Amino acid sequence: MEVNVSFEIPTNWTFKSAGVASSFDSHVREQLPWYELATDAVAHIGRHYIPTNGLIYDIGASTGNIGNALSETIKQRQASLIALEESAEMGCHYSAPGELVITDALTYQYSSFDFGVCFLSFMFFPVSTRRQWLNSVINKLKPGGAFVIVDKIQTPKGYAGTTLRRLAMAWKISTGTSPDDIIQKELSLAGYQRPVSLSVFDDLDAVQFFQLGEFSGWIIEKPE
């Protein structure tokens, strides 16, 4: 199914753009044909970890995709969701359950929580802060809780890596995205988006639940 939504791609990518924010929902589905599949997977995982009256963090919430996916569980369990989003422009389009907080996720003071999601956001964190931040957030996770990350990862070396990069490109073209737009977006992201090294999960007993091309999903549990 073709999405084929066009908007002006910034020379230097930013979510603090009214144009990017207003077109984000359509654009991300155009660029990532598996977006709904991964979203549904996160919602299913959340049902297993969100307790009655539990607290959820959606980190890098954009317009509320994860909050909406978890809405039924939130309602049934009378849980609370705090959506963290750095871009006020994106926040203007937030439409999901919970409390939206416009803030920097790196400096935000987290409360003890039960379930957290970082969906396509971690790759925009400075590399030097990633593991320290991840450790600090997991320290706030309640025993038996879980933290989920879905993100772009560094591709393996050699021909397998080339194959995965081409696979991602082929998916984008299959939605009707023009090759020129694909190249322009990739160049726009230079220096801003850096794929995640799997070494960031070392010693965290992370469990992989998703992998399509260059993107992967992981569950990190807090031992009981």
Image (cartoon, rainbow, N blue to C red):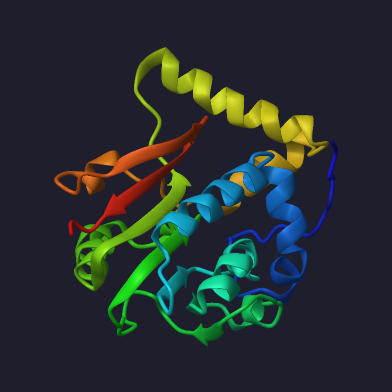
Report whether residue 85 is seen: no
- Residue 78, compared with residue 179, is above or below; it is below
Front residue of 75/164: it is 75
- Residue drawn at x 19%, y 49% is 204
- Residue 133, compared with residue 196, is above or below; it is below
Relative to 165, 7 lies left or right = right
Q: Quadrant of the C terminus?
A: bottom left
Q: Position of residue 18 (x, y in %)?
A: 72, 76
Front residue of 121/67: it is 67
- Residue drawn at x 45%, y 84% is 103
- Residue drawn at x 42%, y 38% is 209
Report whether residue 105 is seen: yes
Relative to 24, 4 lies left or right = right
- Residue 5, compared with residue 92, is above or below; it is above
Q: Position of residue 222 (x, y in %)?
A: 22, 59
Q: Quadrant of residue 33?
A: top right
